[in-house]
């Protein structure tokens, strides 16, 4: 899952980046409204954390522009102005949730998980596909109730596929969503990760769609 | 009572009335005195003319008899001179002789001062018979036939004249008193009328303070306009000061919040004991900031252009249902068009945001918002907004507790617990009210009453 943080306070934004990275997200940072808008407009994010009080271009305007341009990723707004007027304006501009400063990271992470889950059409924090279950709250994966240990990159990849169950996901898309923009991307490593995950899970839920990418799906008859 | 009277004369109305009363009383007194004097003068000169005529007649018919005695060569045709004490008398005196008198004098005798010659007509007032007061015209005459000096005197009782003068004076006094009363009444009306713009200025100013108006607008008289302008400028300045103070508080709070986030999150990396202390302290700081910031933000006064309730509630409902997408919350809104809230948008948002957000959090799937105008408040108009949910509701005895600061009945649903306390604070600052009720949907109903425009 790749997340964009648009926040002008460097320390806070670094704290958020750290916590999100620890929780298995690929994170991009923007410290002003213009860069933030540009990134959100051009890169495929699974969620955006957007501070409303930003230099150059304020959060509400960015959000409104994204939404009119058809960018529909879930957006969590951060605001120090916790009056309802600001919240209503933000939500009306197209935000999916808000968090008022000061906040603690756990709350941010919980809100973010819920947003991503919701946008993927999942209602439970635990996503399952056949015998495989992924708990978005603690990053645990299990098959038939037995825990499976995955590396951070493997988890990110599986998590993205689990959130998009039944859809064909290309390698490029996977690369875009599990690496932040500064990462030296190599789509070949995706194949390596997928193979490792297949081996660790030991259940055939990830199939390769030739020339297009991968699809995560559980078919009863195969079991 | 005396204190109240002296206080009254210190008011503008009192001063105006007192001075106007004084001047009109003085003018009427001078007028009255002149009139009275003129009338008296006219009446007396009429009497004097009659006396002079009689005296001339007497001189004309006087002659010295061959015996050397003064007599009239024909009678003075006037019955009044023959009737004793009739009030009309004449007497002709010569030094050292018995005076020749009218019959009306009877046993009375005028006592002319013969020591001085009077060759031009002289008038005087003397004591007459029967307590009468006489006006006397007298003159010395030397008759052509004899070289003797006679003092001619004609007198008349002034009782009738004095009565006429007195009657006139009484009449005059009555008329003047009537004029005075009328003038005073007119003065009161005039002062009230003249000071009316001042009163309406005062009323308008009270309206500004009560939040019904924002400025002293309207067509003020030329001489009140500078005052109204000054007051408006003062209101502007006051508003600017309040706005600036509010902005400063907001900025301060805003500026504190980001560092506070950083501290809170950094504390996570510390040993548990320190982390707990720091997070407890930062939470306290956060609550203080929230508390004071919210109160500083409350404007609590109407007078602005007003806020269209329906549009605002629609926006709010959209926002809250967006927040509760995963449970598929539906918010039903019922609000008449054109309903206006007499106050600030921020305050409205703060009240309804908290109330509807609460309803959204607790609702299973349904929230209704119904707004209407209350008709039973003649002095100030109010509107009522009722927000209901289909959640678990709150037992009656615990409802008031929710309006207390920092109180929550269920710690599982996130929130600082300030929500409903701030709702009540703002609502009361607008002179409205907030209470809870059982909802027809099964959950809780929160009802707020706010001034309407």
Image (cartoon, coloured by chain):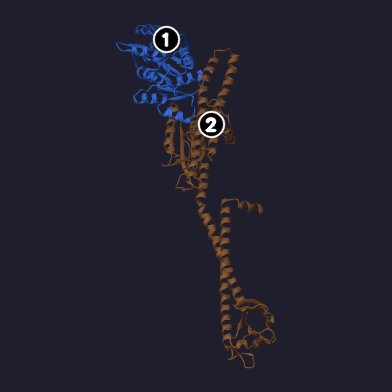
Chain colours: A blue, B brown
Q: Looking at this view, name the residue that lies furthest to the left.
A: A211
Say above or below: A18 vs A59.
above
Residue occupying image coordinates x 46% and y 48%? B222
Measured Cα–Cα span from mark 1 to mark 2: 50 Å
Name the side, left or right, on which B22 lies relative to B126.
left
Residue A165 location in percent, x, y? 38, 17
Residue B216 location in percent, x, y? 48, 44
Tell me if mark 2 has few (under 14), some (14-19) or many (20+) residues whose alpha carbon lies within 10 angstroms of its own. Answer: some
Residue occupying image coordinates x 57% and y 19%? B279
Towards the viewer: A77 or B345: B345
Say above or below: A70 vs B104.
above
Quadrant in the picture for residue B26: bottom right
The chain carrying label 1 is A
Per the image, label 1 sits on a secondary structure element best described as helix
Say above or below: B127 vs B452.
below
Q: Looking at this view, name the residue that lies furthest to the bottom.
A: B66
Per the image, label 2 sits on a secondary structure element best described as helix
Quadrant in the picture for residue B86: bottom right
Residue B207 location in percent, x, y? 51, 44
Q: Which of marks 1 and 2 is in front?
A: 2
Circle 2 sits on which residue?
B296
Tell me if mark 1 has few (under 14), some (14-19) or many (20+) residues whose alpha carbon lies within 10 angstroms of its own. Answer: many
Towards the viewer: B351 or B65: B65
Circle 1 sits on which residue?
A154
Residue B281 location in percent, x, y? 59, 20
């Amino acid at each position: 899952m790749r997340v964009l943080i648009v926040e002008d306070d460097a320390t806070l934004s670094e704290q958020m980046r750290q916590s999100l990275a620890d929780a298995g997200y690929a994170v991009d940072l923007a410290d002003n409204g213009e860069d933030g808008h540009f990134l959100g407009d051009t890169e495929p994010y699974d969620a955006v954390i957007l501070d409303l009080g930003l230099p150059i271009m304020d959060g509400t305007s960015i959000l409104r522009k994204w939404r009119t341009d058809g960018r529909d990723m879930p957006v969590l707004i951060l605001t120090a102005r916790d009056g309802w007027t600001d919240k209503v304006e933000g939500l009306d501009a197209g935000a999916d949730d808000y968090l008022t400063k000061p906040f603690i990271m756990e709350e941010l992470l919980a809100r973010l998980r819920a947003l991503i889950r919701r946008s993927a059409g999942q209602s439970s924090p635990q996503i399952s596909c056949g015998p495989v279950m992924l708990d978005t709250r603690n990053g645990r994966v299990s098959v038939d109730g037995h825990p499976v240990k995955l590396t951070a990159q493997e988890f990110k990849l599986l998590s993205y596929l689990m959130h998009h169950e039944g859809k064909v996901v290309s390698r490029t898309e996977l690369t875009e969503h599990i690496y932040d923009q500064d990462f030296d991307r190599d789509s070949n490593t995706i194949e390596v990760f997928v193979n490792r995950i297949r081996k660790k899970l030991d259940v055939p839920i990830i199939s390769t769609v030739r020339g297009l990418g991968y699809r995560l799906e559980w078919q009863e008859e195969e079991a | 009572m005396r204190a109240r009277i002296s206080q009254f004369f210190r008011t503008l109305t009192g001063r105006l009335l007192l001075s106007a009363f004084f001047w009109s009383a003085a003018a009427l007194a001078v007028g009255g005195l002149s009139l009275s004097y003129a009338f008296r003068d006219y009446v007396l000169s009429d009497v004097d003319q009659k006396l002079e005529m009689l005296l001339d007649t007497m001189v004309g018919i006087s002659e010295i008899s061959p015996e050397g005695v003064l007599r009239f060569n024909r009678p003075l045709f006037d019955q009044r001179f023959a009737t004793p004490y009739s009030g009309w008398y004449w007497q002709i005196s010569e030094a050292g002789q018995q005076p020749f008198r009218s019959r009306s004098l009877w046993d009375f005798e005028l006592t002319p001062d013969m020591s001085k010659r009077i060759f031009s007509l002289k008038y005087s007032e003397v004591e007459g018979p029967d307590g009468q007061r006489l006006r006397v015209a007298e003159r010395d005459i030397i008759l052509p036939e004899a070289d003797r000096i006679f003092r001619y005197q004609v007198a008349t009782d002034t009782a009738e004249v004095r009565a006429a003068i007195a009657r006139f004076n009484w009449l005059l006094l009555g008329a003047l008193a009537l004029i005075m009363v009328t003038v005073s009444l007119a003065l009161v009306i005039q002062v009230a009328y003249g000071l009316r713009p001042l009163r309406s200025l005062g009323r308008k100013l009270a309206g500004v303070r009560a939040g019904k108006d924002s400025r002293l607008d309207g067509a003020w008289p030329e001489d009140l306009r500078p005052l109204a302008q000054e007051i408006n400028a003062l209101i502007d300045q006051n508003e600017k000061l309040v706005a600036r103070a509010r902005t400063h508080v907001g900025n301060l709070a805003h500026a504190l919040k980001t560092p506070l986030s950083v501290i809170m999150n950094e504390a996570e990396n510390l040993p548990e004991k320190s982390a707990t202390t720091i997070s407890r302290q930062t939470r306290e700081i956060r609550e203080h900031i929230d508390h004071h910031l919210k109160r500083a933000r409350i404007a609590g006064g109407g007078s602005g252009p007003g806020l269209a309730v329906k549009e605002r509630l629609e926006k709010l409902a959209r926002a809250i249902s967006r927040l509760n997408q995963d449970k598929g919350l539906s918010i039903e809104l019922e609000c008449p068009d054109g309903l206006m809230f007499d106050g600030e948008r921020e305050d409205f948002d703060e009240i309804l945001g908290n109330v509807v957000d609460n309803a959204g959090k607790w609702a299973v799937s349904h929230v209704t918002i119904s707004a209407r105008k209350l008709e039973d408040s003649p002095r100030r108009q109010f509107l009522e907004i009722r927000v209901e949910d289909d959640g678990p509701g709150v037992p009656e005895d615990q409802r008031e507790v929710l309006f207390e600061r920092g109180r929550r009945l269920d710690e599982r649903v996130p929130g600082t617990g300030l929500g409903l306390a701030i709702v009540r604070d703002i609502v009361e600052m607008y002179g409205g009210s907030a209470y809870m009720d059982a909802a027809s949907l099964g959950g809780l109903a929160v009802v707020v009453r706010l001034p309407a425009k």
